[in-house]
Image: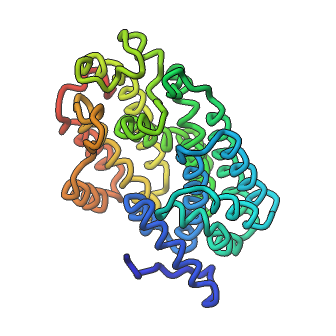
Amino acid sequence: MSTNVPDSPQLSLDDHPDWQFCWERLLEVSRTFSRPIELLPDTLRVATTCGYLLCRIADTVEDHGDLSTERRDELYKAFLRVLEQGADPANFTNRFAEIPGDGPEFQLAENLDRVLSVFEQFPDDILAICTRWVGEMTRGMRLYGHRPTDADGLTVLDNLADLERYCYYVAGTVGHLLTELFDHHIEELDEERALEMRARAESFGVGLQMVNVLKDQTDDFARGWSFIPRSLMARQGLEPSELHDPDHRERAHEVVRPIFEGAADHLDGALDYTLAIPPKHRQIQLFCLLPLWMAVRTLVHAEGHDAMFIPDEPVKIDRNEVESLIADALEHVEDDEALRERYETLWDGRRGELGTLHR
């Protein structure tokens, strides 16, 4: 585990162990996302880390497959009371400690108090931004947690609008959270750029989430969820239980094609979002570029790839390509025209014909 913990001007030496805890948990729960966060200016890096970790705690509750709806609701309510009403974190952590499981996500959730000890050192306006959007995410997760299951035990989304709504709650909210943190940090942000960022904020989060939906569908299926909408499967004459059947592979690819198209449209919006950030704020632009570049290449790699439908067959770009994408973003970050050209190049290197995917 890395011990290279970025310094923060917000923390005293007495509080430094809790910042170290937060940073180490971030590296464990998301090595991919930790790299862009590390590029941010000090204060913004700490605020973004805390916001992200709070989102991951809510996400850990959502992803726990062994919880009843009632138990999950209790955890969501306790988390919101701590976050929004200042209740003792033990109201959440004691309940969470009673459920089975281990790993870094569980260690994070069981130490909510340590995240809050860092988070609460920020001024009220920063606290309000994070609290609003983490609360919105949590309530959306709770709403979707009440979806009924099929006779075969699967919970399946209804249609593309349902998928868009779900992606808003779990990722579009993050786009808004980041946008308000960036707006707070960039003192000279003019109205035109601010409006463009707010208009594209949801696309930044939703595009990345749709890529995750496509590449993680077998993992979701294993825990009883399908975020591939029922209406898309019905159009191809498939039931949810048949989506991953090798005998229906060609139709399965047709099922997910509209999601590829929607993801690509949102990633286009994410590029516009990134380029609305003033070029002098290179660190913030890089924070947005790295996940965007990787999402495009992951989407290209996944399209037409049977591994999407095969358990334990990861759909991801390799480490060498990740390093190449990072180097590419670093090289062109200060040139908006070059970035648009590089974005188009990422699509041109696709595995197979994407048809109407990229418009």
Image location of residue 154, percent across then percent down:
50, 28
Total count of labels: 0
In which quarter of the view is residue 36 placed? bottom left
Residue 175 can be seen in this image? yes
Image location of residue 174, percent across then percent down:
57, 49
Vertical placement of 244 versus 84: above or below?
Answer: above
- Foreground residue among 108 and 95: 95
Vertical placement of 258 versus 187: above or below?
Answer: above
Image location of residue 342, percent across then percent down:
26, 46
Q: Is residue 69 left or right of residue 203?
A: right
- Foreground residue among 297 and 249: 249
- Foreground residue among 136 and 346: 136
Image quadrant in which the C terminus is located: top left
- Foreground residue among 265 and 223: 223
Image quadrant in which the N terminus is located: bottom left
Q: Is residue 338 left or right of residue 268?
A: left
Residue 280 can be seen in this image? no
Question: Residue pushed farthest bottom?
Answer: 13
Residue at horizontal 43%, vertical 43%? 208
Residue at horizontal 28%, vertical 49%? 338
Residue at horizontal 46%, vertical 30%? 226
Residue at horizontal 55%, vertical 52%? 60
Applied colour scheme: rainbow
